[in-house]
Image: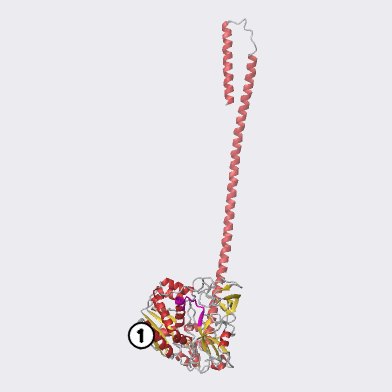
Amino acid sequence: MTSSSHRIWPLKGGVHPDFHKEESNQQAIATAPLPDKLIVPIRQHIGELGELVVQVNDYVYKGQILTTQPEGLGSLTHAPTSGTIIDIGRYPIPHASGFSCPGVILKPDGKEDWGEHRLSPHSNHLSADKNQLLEQLYQAGLVGLGGAAFPSMVKISTADKSTIKTLIINAAECEPYITCDDMLMRESADELIQGILILIQLLQPEQCLIGIEENKPEAIAAMQSALTTANNNVIKLVTIPSIYPSGDEKQLIQILTGIAIPKSTLSFDYGILCHNIATVHSIYNAVVKGEPLISRTVTITGSGVKHPQNFKVLIGTPFHHLITTAGGYTEKAERLLMGGPMMGFSMQTDEVPVVKATNCILALSEAELPYSLTMAMPCIRCGKCAEVCPVDLLPQQLYWHARAEDLEKVQQHKLFDCIECGCCSYVCPSNIPLVSYYRHAKGAVRANAEKLQKTDQARERHEYREFRLQREKDERKAKLAKHKAALQKKKAAMAAAKANGNNKQNAVSDVIKAAMERTKAKKAAAQQQAKQSQPRNTDNLTVAQQQQIDQADARRSASTKQNTETDNK
Ligand code: SF4
Ligand code: SF4
C-alpha cells in the first residue's frame, strides 16, 4: 500500500541540517576485504555478558559461538570468520564511555569455513513455529542495529506477550551522512520485505508501517516494488518529511501514529513495537540463510575520507582497515566519530573494532562539526534552542544548571527526557555544545546515584556486621548458659548416683554379715552334732530312754538339714 493513504503527524521542533547523503550513496555496497585480525568484544549489546568459552590458539569456525549463554537479558557473540584465536584480553571498544571490554583477537585463515556452525535455515519461514523462530533469533545473537543494540529476541518475545497492534519499521535514517539503510533498501528490498513478514508472523499486528524519509527516492521505489510483489495488505510504506530527528523511535511513532509515548513508558504499552530496517535484514539472514549476526553494512564517509562508500563489514574489523579500504584519510580528517555528526561520539583511536551497533564511521574537520567546545561563546538568551527541542525541554535552563553542576535542578528540568538529538546545539548562535553538557550532567547524576548506592550498601553492610556480631555474642552467651546448666545437671546426677551407690553397698554388707552369722551358726551346729554323735553306752538304758534319745537325734538331724538348705539358697 502506498503512503498517500496513511495520515502522518508533524514532528515538534527538529532541524534541517545539510544531509550529505550523496557523498556515500552513489556506489553499491562493497564487501570489505578480510583484515589481518578481528577484534571481537563480547560486550556489543545492552544486558548481561556470557563468558568466553575459547582459549588462545583455539581454531574457530565461522559462526561458532564464543561465549556461554548470558543470564537474563543478553546476547550471544559469534566468530565472524574461521581462524585462530591469537589473544584474549580487554580491548578498547567504540563507546561514548571510552571503556575497554573483554574479547578475543581472531586471526582469519581466509577459508570462511562454517564447519557445522551455520544455523539451520527455515525454508518455509512464513509458516514456521513461533518458538523455533524465536530460538533461531536468539542463537543468531541478534540485537537492534539502530544504535541501542537491545537484544532483538527479548524485544520480540516480550512484545509477543502483549498485543501488538502496530509494527513500525524505522527506515527514516534522518542523521546526516549515514546511508547504510538507504543502500540496503535499494539493494535488498525483497529480503527486507521477507524479514518484515517474519516479524508479522511472530507478532500478528493489525498493521505494519515502514517509515522512510522522502529524501530517499530510490529506496522508496525499491521497497514499493518489493511490497507490490509480496502483495501483503498489512504492510504500508509511509514517506515522511526529511527532518531531523524523525528517526528517533518515539518521534517516528508520533509522526506515524500521532501517539506521544511519555518518558519512562514503553511503546509496548500502546500496542506498538518498533524495529530498525537493518535489524529486519539480520532477522532475514538468521531465519532464511541460517547466518548469525557476524556482519553488517557500515557507511565510511566524511570529508576526511578519500572515497566514501558503504561496506558489508565483518564484526570486529578495525576502523583503520575500513578507512584504508575507503582510500585512506584526507588532510581534513581532524575528528573521527562513530555515528553521525548529531548523535555520534568521538573516537580517540581508529584501533577500535566495528561492533553490532556501528552504522557509520565519520571523519571530518573541526569546522564541519555542528558544534564544538573550542568555538563556544556566552549564551545570548535567544531561545532558539527551546524552539527546536522535539521533546519540549528548556535547553538553556538545562545548560545553566548543568554548567553549575546543580544535579537536583537539572533533574527537575527533566534532564533524562533529553534524547540527546543535538538540535539545540545545532541552532545555538553561540556555538555552545549544549548536548555535551547534558551528557556530562547525566553521567554525573548516574555517578552520584551509584555513589549513594555504594554508601547505602556500605551502611547496610556495617549494620549487618553489627547485627551479626551481636547475634554471635548472644549465641555464645546462650551456649555458655546451656553448658553450665548441663554441667550442674550432671553434677546432681553424679551426687544422686553416689548416694544410691552407698545404699547399695550397705545392703551388700548386710547380706554378707547375715551369711557370716549363718556360717558361724552352721559351724557351731556341726561341732555340737559331732560331740553328740560320739558312741553312747546304751547298754544300761531302758527302752523308753533309748526311744527318747533316738527322737532327739532325729530332731537335730532335721534341723541341720533345714539350715543347710537355707544356706544353699
Ligand atoms: S540557543 Fe544558545 S544562545 Fe540561544 S538561548 Fe539557547 S543556549 Fe542561549
Ligand atoms: S539535545 Fe535534548 S535538550 Fe537539546 S534539543 Fe535535543 S532533546 Fe532537546
Q: Which residue is located at x 60 percent, y 46 percent?
A: 491
Residue 441: percent from left, percent from top: 53, 83
Give the residue type that dot 1 points to: Met
In which quadrant will I find the N terminus? Answer: bottom left
Residue 248 x, y percent position in the rendering:
45, 85
Residue 291 is one of the magenta-drawn residues: yes
Judging from the image, what secondary structure is the residue with disc 1 in?
Answer: loop
Numbered range of the magenta stretch = 285-296
Front-most of residues 468 and 126: 126
Q: Quadrant of residue 261?
A: bottom left
Q: Residue 537, relative to residue 465: is it above or below?
A: above
In the rendered image, residue 433 lying in the magenta stretch gets the answer no
Q: Residues within 10 Å of mark 1 (few under 14, many from 20)?
A: some
The structure residue drawn at horizontal position 58% and vertical position 20%, both measured from the top left corner, is: 561
On the question of residue 37 being in view, the answer is yes
Residue 226 occupies which quadrant of the picture? bottom left
Compared with 283, 382 (above or below) is below
Give the labeled residue for mark 1: 1
Q: Report the number of numbered marks.
A: 1
Q: Is residue 258 visible?
A: no
Q: Which residue is drawn at the image coordinates 58% and 60% (left, top)?
A: 472
